[in-house]
Amino acid sequence: QVQLVESGGGLVQPGGSLRLSCAVSGSTFSFIAMGWYRQAPGKQRDLVAGIARGGSTNYADSVKDRFTISKDNAKNTVYLQMNSLNSEDTAVYYCYAKGPFGPGDDYWGQGTQVTVSS
């Protein structure tokens, strides 16, 4: 049973930084890709950043040059470093992993709240 457990969310002032962590019960290397999504109240869940098994990354335009996704395969952990946060970054952030066995082989964490407010 694969489990993803996020941590690191909280309240931060505009312009501040947070680092989210996603601890994986299995090996991060076994997944085709991993990523972070976010969902604000009343909005759909959108991709924030993704990282492929080989290490290539992609980002939503709204977070480019502010957020950095990385993974430590030895620790089975994926990170999201978030800098220059603003109120539009307020959302629940979810860790996601795509397994190698096709549709349905997807996993989600329970989410961690990030609130940017003065």
Image (spheres, rainbow, N blue to C red):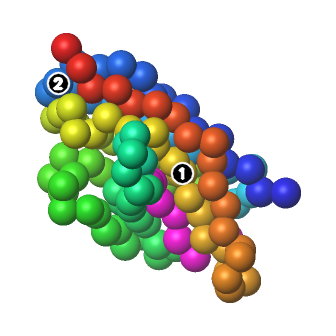
Which residue is more in the foreground, 95 or 38? Answer: 38
Residue tagged 1? 95
- Amino acid type of the residue tagged 2 in the rendering: Pro
Q: Earlier in the sequence, mark 2 or mark 1?
A: 2
| Label ID, residue 55 | none
- Say what amino acid the circle numbered 1 marks: Cys
Horizontal arrangement in the rendering, residue 92 relative to residue 90 (left or right): right
Residue 41 lies in quadrant: top left
| Residue 117 visible somewhere in the drawing | yes
> In the rendered image of this protein, does residue 16 appear above or below residue 95?
above
Circle 2 residue: 14
- The range drawn in magenta is 29-37
Where disc 1 sits, the SS reads strand
**Which element type, helix, strand or loop, lies under badge 2?**
loop
Residue projecting furthest to the top: 118
Viewed as shown, does residue 88 lie left or right of 11?
left
Q: Residue at x 43, y 66 (%)?
A: 51
Q: Residue furthest front?
A: 42
Q: Nearer the viewer, residue 92 or 102?
A: 92
Confirm whether the magenta stretch covers residue 118: no
Left or right? Give the position of 92 relative to 27: left
| Residue 56, horizontal then vertical, whole percent | 37, 73
Asked if residue 50 is positioned above or below residue 14 in the image, the reply reads below
